[in-house]
Every structure is written in structure tokens, then in C-alpha cells.
Image (cartoon, rainbow, N blue to C red):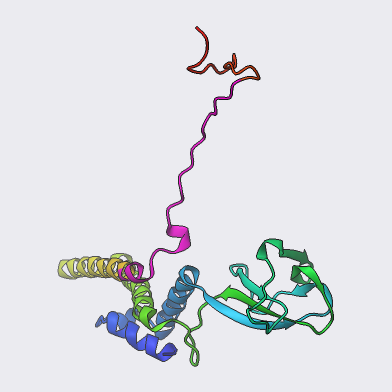
Amino acid sequence: MPLADFQTLVDALVRDADRGDVLTPADRDDAIASAVAQYSHAQPRNVVVDLTSPGGARIDVPAGFTADSRLVSIEYPVGRLPASELPLSEVRFYAQPSGRQIELPVVLDAGELLRVTYTGAQLVDAVDDTVPRHHRQAVASLAASFLCLQLASYYATEGEPTIAADTVDYKTKSDRFRALAKDYAAAFTRVVGDTPSDRAQGASVTVQLERPDALGNGRMFHPTRNWPR
């Protein structure tokens, strides 16, 4: 289901008689791209690549490895059964002017292979579509919500109707598209869930520990219930 199919889904969700005068096909494609990017943040795909070591303990990061990517596993040596993986807790990133490298806990000979699995963005273009089938409608709904927000903004601020009836009509359309945008965004969240940045952070609390002195008595600066009276 490449880009053309997502375009069809989004067109079916955003049906406005005036849409052709407000939104362009480029606007729709931008909305799809934004929806895929947000989906990628919530549900990145695993990318597997084989890298050839130049020798030593460092190797360049894969070409598709971005600032949002994270390492999932590094198999070395490749091909063992069961698979042999390097402990990620001992893997580091090394920054240099030409880019980042992966610093390994082992020294490799030139030509040795590593199988690296990392997270990457989902792909939706004219040929590729990596969004799972059960999430495609949700991604299309998120793209439709972006377009509905644009239509709501247009009817709320851009139009300059000349008669009162048109003014009421524009306000009604703005409210309608804003409500649709909310519904479509909620449809995405119901299926995919919140993106990591939207999820609530765990609460923290600081506890004052009561520690007795060497004799087992309470300390003068912080008396306890066992302090002699």
C-alpha cells in the first residue's frame, strides 16, 4: 500500500466541496508525511544491516541511523546458532567531525561482519510502505486531522464573506472541521497510542531517611520517634 493508496484513504476522509480552492495535493501529501513521521516516533520500525569492519573497535553508524534511532542489537560473530550478541551496555557512541561511530567492546579484524539492528523511520512513498496493515487507517486518519485543522483555520480567519449568511456558514464549517480533526486524531490514538512525548512522566518523590548514629540513637539534627525523652 504505497503513497497513492494513502492519498485515496485521506481523500475519502476529507470531503469538502471547497477543498480544491483551499488545499492542494501537495498539502495532502505534506499531511501524510507528517502523519508518518509522528507514527514513526510512536512505532519505529526495526532495520537490519550488515556492516563490514575496517578493523579496530569502532565502526561507522549505518547510513539510515538518525538522531532518533536507537540500537536494538549487534550480532557478532554473525551466523551462530543461537545468535551471539554484544552487550549493548558496553557499546558506546564516539563523536568525530565526520560523524558518529559505534564503539564496540571488542577489537575486530578488517573485513569481519556485524549484524546491526536499529530503529528507523517508517517509509511511505511511491514504492515502499512499511506501515503495518492494521495501522494504515489510523495513519490516514491522523493525516486527515491535519488537513481538517487547516480547513478550520481557513474558514475561521481567511475568508471575508460579504453577507451575514456567509459569515455564519464559514463559522459553522470552521467548527465542523475542528471537530473532525479532533475525532480523527483520537482515532489514531485509540489504535496506535500516544507518542512517547505525550505519555505522562512517572512521578518522583524525595524521602528523608532516618538513620541512627553508631550507638543506635537518633541524630540531633533529625530526631526520630525512638529519640529518648
Which of the two residues, 130 or 208, is positioned nearer the viewer here? 208
Along the viewing direction, whichever of 37 and 82 lies nearer the viewer: 82
- The residue most toward the top is 229
Front residue of 188/88: it is 88
Q: Residue at x 42, y 76 (%)?
A: 31
Q: What range of the chain is rendered magenta?
A: 187-212
Q: State how many labels appear.
A: 0
Residue 201 part of the magenta segment: yes
The quadrant in which residue 9 appears is bottom left
Residue 172 placement (x, y as % from top left): 20, 67
At horizontal 57% and vertical 17% (from top left) the residue drawn is: 218
Q: Residue at x 38, y 86 (%)?
A: 7
Prevailing secondary structure of the magenta residues: loop
- Location of the N terminus by quadrant is bottom left
Q: Is residue 210 above or below residue 199?
A: above
Q: Assess whether residue 126 is covered by the magenta stretch.
A: no
Q: Position of residue 167 (x, y in %)?
A: 20, 67
| Image position, residue 68 (x, y; %) | 58, 68
| Pick the front one: 20 or 213 | 213
Vertical order, 201 against 164 (above or below): above
Compared across the picture, whether 108 is left or right of 206 comes to right
Q: Is residue 189 left or right of residue 77?
A: left
* Relative vertical location of residue 188 with respect to residue 130 in this rendering, above or below: above
Looking at the picture, how far across and down is residue 76, in whole percent? 71, 77
Is residue 80 found left or right of 57 in the rendered image?
left
Q: Is residue 155 above or below residue 62?
A: above
Q: Residue furthest bottom?
A: 127
Furthest-left residue in view? 165
